[in-house]
Structure formats: structure tokens, C-alpha cells
Image: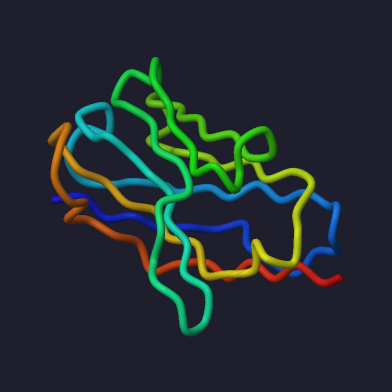
């Protein structure tokens, strides 16, 4: 079992930047593939970015490519989401998620952190 705690959300103007952090506790962090999801009011929760255990492979939603960067520090049990050139449509609750498998759903979730981008 792993526990995930996100931080770094807040209110920012369009064009600004934020960095989200997710600290994991429990089993060895390097055993987990990690991801960031987001959910806007009235919408489904969608994948934003994902990173493999070793950090050697990442993927991004088309809507954030070139603006967001996912990274991890296995020594600090932390995964990050650097968000640049933020847009009002990026406003959502951002969730950190973890899984030990390559395929399938993410069984472990954080509580979420609110990101609000004003125009």
C-alpha cells in the first residue's frame, strides 16, 4: 500500500506557472508507475501525464504537451508536475496516482489539489 499527498496548487493568472508535488509513503516508491490526473467541475477525470518507475519514459495528454513536464525523484519519494503557460481551461482538481503494473487502472490516489487559472 502507498499513501499519496499532493501539494502546490493555488490561484494563478493565465500565462503563469505552478509546480505540483506528490509525496509517497509506504512501499518502495521506485516500484510505482506514477501519473497526474485532473478533474474539472462537471467533467470526467482525465490523465494529464504519466511517468514510468525509472523515469525514463513519459507521456502527456495532447492538451498539455509542450507546457507541462512530469518528473520524479525516487530518492525523495516525490513526483512533480511543472505547469507552464497555464490557461483557464487548466483549472481543475489535480490528483496524483500510482500503480505497480504497466497496464490497467491506478489503484492508489491522493486527495487532490486545486489549481485555478484566472483569465
Q: Residue 12 sits in which quadrant?
A: bottom right
Q: Residue furthest top?
A: 56
Q: What is the count of numbered marks?
A: 0
Q: Position of residue 13 (x, y in %)?
A: 86, 64
Residue visible at 48% across and 49% down in the picture: 48
Residue visible at 64% across and 68% down in the picture: 91
* Foreground residue among 5 and 41: 41
Residue visible at 70% across and 71% down in the picture: 116
Left or right? Give the position of 75 relative to 87.
left
* Foreground residue among 94 and 66: 66
Q: Position of residue 3 (x, y in %)?
A: 26, 55
Q: Position of residue 58 (x, y in %)?
A: 43, 27
* Foreground residue among 49 and 30: 49
Q: Residue 55 sits in which quadrant?
A: top left
Q: Residue furthest bottom?
A: 42
Q: Position of residue 57 (x, y in %)?
A: 39, 20
> Image height check: is 70 above or below 97?
above
Left or right? Give the position of 13 relative to 74.
right
Q: Specify how the rendered protein is coloured.
A: rainbow
Q: Residue 28 sits in which quadrant?
A: top left
Left or right? Give the position of 81 relative to 48.
right
> Image height check: is 56 above or below 86?
above
For the C terminus, the quadrant is: bottom right
Amino acid at each position: 500500500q502507498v499513501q499519496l499527498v499532493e501539494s502546490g496548487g493555488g490561484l494563478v493568472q493565465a500565462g503563469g506557472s505552478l509546480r505540483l508535488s506528490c509525496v509517497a509513503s509506504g512501499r518502495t516508491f521506485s516500484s510505482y508507475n506514477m501519473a497526474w490526473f485532473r478533474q474539472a467541475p462537471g467533467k470526467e477525470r482525465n490523465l494529464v501525464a504519466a511517468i514510468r518507475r525509472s523515469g525514463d519514459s513519459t507521456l502527456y495528454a495532447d492538451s498539455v504537451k509542450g507546457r507541462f513536464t512530469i518528473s520524479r525523484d525516487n530518492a525523495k519519494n516525490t513526483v512533480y508536475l511543472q505547469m507552464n503557460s497555464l490557461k483557464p481551461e487548466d483549472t481543475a482538481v489535480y490528483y496524483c496516482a500510482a500503480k505497480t503494473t504497466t497496464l490497467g487502472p491506478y489503484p492508489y490516489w491522493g486527495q487532490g489539489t486545486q489549481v485555478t487559472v484566472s483569465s
